[in-house]
């Protein structure tokens, strides 16, 4: 299946979870927020959130400074 992560296409096996997509993209899981198709998915739900073809994933990295 094909999903988009921050506007970049990613091919994944059918039945992949959000956690697997994040790992496949090489994004560290600490300090990030995730949403799938505009719905926020908390860190605790990433392992159980199964993706479908065409899903749009947004990953936001937390940062701080001034």
Image (cartoon, helix red, strand yellow):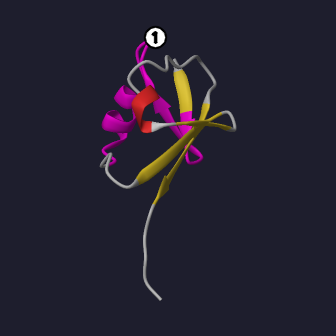
**Front-most of 48 and 21?**
48
Image position, residue 21 (x, y; %): 40, 31
Over which residues does the magenta segment extend?
4-27
Image position, residue 13 (x, y; %): 40, 15
User: How many numbered callouts?
Assistant: 1
Relative to 29, 52 lies left or right? right
Relative to 3, 44 lies left or right? left
Given the current orientation, which residue lies at the most extreme right position? Answer: 38
Residue at left offset 55%, top offset 29%: 3
Residue at left offset 49%, top offset 16%: 50
Which residue is disc 1 drawn over? 14
Q: Secondary structure at mark 1?
A: loop
> In the rendered view, would you say 43 is above or below 32?
above
**Front-most of 7 and 59?**
59
| Crowd band around label 1 with a 10 angstrom C-alpha radius: few (<14), some (14–19), many (20+) | few
Image position, residue 55 (x, y; %): 62, 27
Residue at left offset 45%, top offset 10%: 15
Residue at left offset 31%, top offset 51%: 30
Magenta stretch containing residue 7, yes or no? yes
Image position, residue 66 (x, y; %): 47, 89
> In the rendered view, would you say 24 is above or below 33?
above
Magenta stretch containing residue 61, yes or no? no
> Which picture quadrant has residue 63?
bottom left
> In the rendered view, would you say 39 is above or below 64?
above
């Amino acid at each position: 299946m094909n999903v988009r992560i921050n506007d970049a296409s990613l091919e994944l096996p059918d039945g992949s979870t959000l956690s697997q997509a994040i790992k496949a993209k090489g994004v560290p899981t600490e300090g990030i927020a995730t949403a799938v198709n505009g719905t926020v998915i908390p860190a605790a739900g990433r392992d159980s959130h199964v993706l479908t073809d065409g899903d749009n994933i947004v990953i936001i990295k937390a940062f701080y400074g001034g």
